[in-house]
């Protein structure tokens, strides 16, 4: 086996070897370079991504913040800027995202009673720009799960912690090219390049739980280990003559419990 990417070594043991073998097979059999773009996030990173995502967009089909804005889906601005709401895991980063009209970080003062107030009130449009810029810099363009189970303030959607925190998920590049190469090598076997990728991943007990969702919820790059109750292929290598269709995944437990 070729030298393993250090990003792969950061993965949880439950998927590390399977991802490494899958990458090697894609390279040796189809001459496609599949790379790990992201493995682990800290809990604080995941929570930051999630809170900002839930304030700005909320692409989760079945999750809503505890206190919603007028759109019924995103976090209320009044709740977001409340100086006495303690943000789970990232309370010390609140001023990075809540900005005054001139773009400066909001600054809190504590009264003798312990209540917090803003020296200058955060302004919504400046704060929105700061949050959107942060997600863009970190290439977060889709759903982002919390850093802790249950989520917590200021969102409180109750979502499950990101598998990127534990290393049980990774984001991969090269899968689109891989699907095209597999389909070209085995004409008539697959309904689409996505179908080819799904079946290839299944041979290594991997899957893309978000690849077939609609709109912004769709993530073609996010890969996890198959749930334990899904049978593993008898052969771990990708042999056309022994291929069988990967199982239909719609019956698997709610995929929104295993998000990015």
Image (cartoon, rainbow, N blue to C red):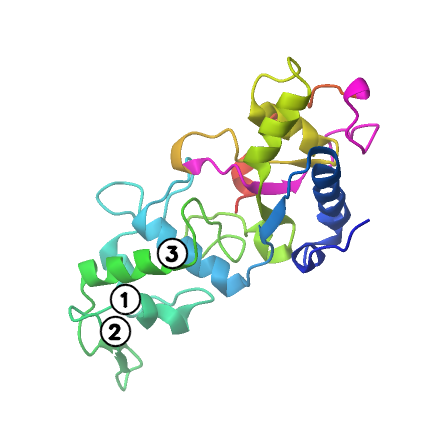
The answer to whether residue 168 is above or below residue 186 is: below
Q: Is residue 120 above or below residue 200?
A: below
255 lies left or right of 124: right
Which SS does the magenta portion mostly show? loop
What's the mark number on residue 98?
1
Q: Are marks 2 and 1 in contact (CB under 8 Å)?
A: yes
How crowded pointer 1 is (Cα within 10 Å; few <14, some 14-19, many 20+) is rated as many
Instruction: Report the front residue among 17 and 124.
Output: 17
Q: Residue at x 64, y 39 (%)?
A: 32
Left or right: 143 with respect to 182? left
The residue that appears at 51% across and 58% down in the rendered structure is: 147
Please state the horizontal and vertical placement of residue 47, each as a whole percent of the image.
Answer: 46, 59
Q: Which numbered disc flags the more N-terminal residue, 2 or 3?
A: 2
Q: Which residue is mark 2?
A: 106
Q: Secondary structure at mark 1?
A: loop
User: Marks 2/1: CA distance?
Assistant: 6 Å
Please say whether residue 111 is visible from this viewpoint: yes
* Residue range of the region highlighted in magenta in the rendering: 217-242
Q: Is residue 28 left or right of residue 86?
A: right
Mark 2–mark 3 Cα distance, whole angstroms, equals 19 Å
Neighbor class of circle 3 (other Cα within 10 Å; few <14, some 14-19, many 20+) is: some
Q: Nearer the viewer, residue 128 or 236?
A: 236
Judging from the image, what secondary structure is the residue with disc 2 in?
loop
- Expressed as whole percent of the image width and height from the top left, the position of residue 90 reads 43, 67
Which residue is label 3 attached to?
Answer: 135
């Amino acid at each position: 086996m070729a030298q393993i990417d250090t990003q792969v070594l950061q993965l949880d043991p439950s998927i590390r070897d399977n991802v490494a073998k899958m990458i090697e097979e894609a390279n040796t059999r189809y001459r496609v370079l599949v790379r790990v773009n992201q493995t682990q996030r800290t809990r604080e990173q995941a929570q930051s991504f999630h809170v900002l995502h839930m304030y700005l967009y909320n692409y989760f089909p079945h999750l809503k913040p505890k206190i919603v804005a007028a759109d019924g889906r995103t976090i209320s601005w009044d709740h977001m800027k409340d100086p006495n709401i303690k943000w789970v895991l990232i309370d010390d980063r609140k001023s990075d995202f809540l900005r005054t009209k001139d773009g400066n970080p909001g600054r809190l003062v504590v009264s003798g009673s312990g209540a917090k107030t803003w020296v200058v009130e955060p302004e919504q449009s400046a704060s929105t720009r700061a949050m959107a810029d942060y997600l863009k810099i970190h290439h977060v363009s889709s759903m982002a799960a919390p850093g802790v189970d249950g989520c917590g303030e200021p969102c409180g959607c109750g979502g499950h912690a990101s598998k990127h925190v534990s290393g049980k998920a990774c984001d991969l590049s090269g899968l689109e090219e891989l699907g095209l190469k597999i389909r070209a090598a085995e004409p008539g076997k697959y309904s689409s390049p996505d179908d080819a990728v799904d079946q290839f991943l299944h041979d290594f007990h991997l899957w893309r739980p978000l690849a077939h969702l609609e709109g912004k919820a769709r993530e073609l790059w996010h890969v996890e280990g198959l749930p334990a109750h899904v049978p593993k292929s008898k052969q771990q290598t990708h042999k056309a003559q022994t291929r069988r269709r990967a199982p239909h995944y719609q019956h698997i437990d709610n995929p929104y419990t295993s998000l990015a």
